[in-house]
Image: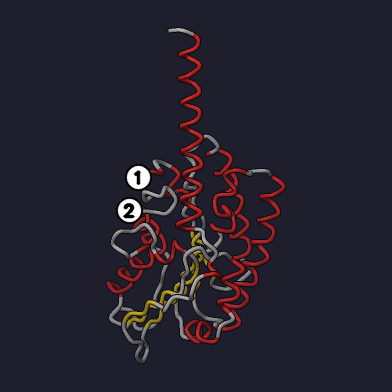
Amino acid sequence: MSKRIITMIVSICTATTLLWTVGLIITIQDQFFYEASSIKQPEPTTSNIKQNNGLSIVALGDSLTRGTGDETGKGYVGYVVDDLKKRTNQHMQFTNLAIKGQRSPQLINQLKQKEVQRQLKEADIILMTIGGNDLFRGGEALRDLSHAQIEKEKKKFVEQLHTIFQLIRTVNDDATVFYIALYNPFNDLDNGKETSAIVRSWNYAASEVAADYKSIICVPTYDLFELQVNDYLYTDKFHPNKEGYKRIGERVASLTTLTKGEK
């Protein structure tokens, strides 16, 4: 094989890899990381009516809590609710206030809304995902993994997470809050080792914040996706698929306890 042909093959392979990476970033940006502040606030997804001594569950955050990528539409919160229904005869109300693409500053603004505070005040259990969009920044983090930039973003996120937990506790001092930590959907890429280290660092920082507040539990998910990550991802290679959400839901459900009207 001539040197010219070998050079052409190498060039084609390099270009293909570059196009795939750029395409992945564009897909993430266009479909899943648009600014939450630019879209209309969704109508809360609510099921059943809370009655005397009923159980109220409120979900907050981003597209992971909306269940993006699960073809059944349940998401991890659906599996948590299904588990609770098996364990109690209480009437149950579930409200999903999560917004696709939401970052921590938008969640802070949402938590200041009167209707959201009314929902939270009644909640017995609060489920929440936030931080993935802060970290990956519309795919920008895949192009810039500089330590200084990542640490800057993490510091801002830690401050905002404190504000989020403080706002929740101002409205409701008793509800158990489950903050679902980050997993790394990119650990099979060439820079997977770097992104995994970054995600672990962010999760540790978030767990330290949660430890400062009563009944706020940081739920790990990193280990659920670390091996054979693509088995648990949707076709966008970012959000979980049905099986991925099921694993998260089972993890959260295993940590829940019921104190009112439990069977």
From the image, tell me which residue sits under label 2: 243
Label 1 CA crowd tier, 10 Å (few <14, some 14–19, many 20+): few
Label 2, secondary structure: give it: helix
Residue at the top extreme, as displayed:
2
Task: Report x, y in % for residue 11.
Answer: 50, 23
Cβ–Cβ below 8 Å for labels 1 and 2? yes
Above or below 263: residue 20: above
Residue shown at 59% from the left, 79% from the top? 169
How far apart marks 1 and 2 lie (CA) works out to 8 Å
- Image quarter for residue 112? bottom right
From the image, tell me which residue sits under label 1: 231
Task: Report x, y in % for residue 97.
Answer: 45, 75
Task: Report x, y in % for residue 69.
Answer: 37, 57
What amino acid is at disc 1?
Asp
In depth, the one of 258 and 128 nearer the eye is 128
Task: Report x, y in % for residue 217.
Answer: 52, 66
* Left or right of residue 92: residue 6: right
What amino acid is at disc 2?
Glu
* Residue 34 tag number: none
Residue shown at 41% from the left, 44% from the top? 229
